[in-house]
Image: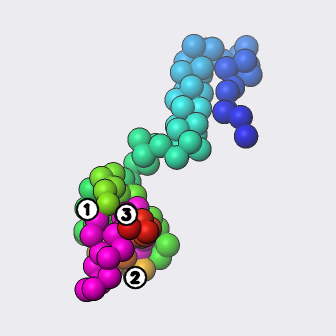
Amino acid sequence: MSKLVLDLKVPADYKKPDLQEIIRAICTQVNILSEGRISARYQAQVSVPTSVAANVGDIVWDSNTTVRPSVAPGVASSYVRLGWVCNVASPTNATWQEMRVLTGA
């Protein structure tokens, strides 16, 4: 899929520079999101969310992903935490579970 570019589709009835600025901002956000860039994720943070409203399945990405040691005694596999997924919804303080990927080490 190509990047979203709408600069040439601005109607003449609008203030073209203003509308182009808005469209560029939208295009930039969509493009970096489609490329998987963490800068496109407004909910990215360095620690598990606390005191936030969430629905089951909501995701908060980890903006400080690093290889972490195994959490299981006697198991040498390390992992990378991608973020957290809400597994118990709440209007004030949802419960979150880490999303992990094993590194194979």
> Residue 74 at x, y = what percent?
27, 85
Q: Residue at x 72, y 18 (%)?
A: 8
First to last magenta residue range = 68-86
> Residue 105 at x, y = what percent?
38, 67
Tag nearer the camera, 3 or 2: 3
Mark 3 neighbour density, 10 Å: few (under 14) some (14–19) many (20 or more): some
Mark 1 neighbour density, 10 Å: few (under 14) some (14–19) many (20 or more): few
Helix, strand or loop for disc 3: strand
Which residue is disc 3 drawn over? 80
Helix, strand or loop for disc 2: strand
Which residue is disc 1 drawn over? 47
- Is residue 26 among the parts visible in the rendering? no
Residue 91 sits inside the magenta stretch = no
Check disc 2 and give the amino acid type: Val
Residue 73 sits inside the magenta stretch = yes
- As displayed, is residue 4 above or below residue 36? above
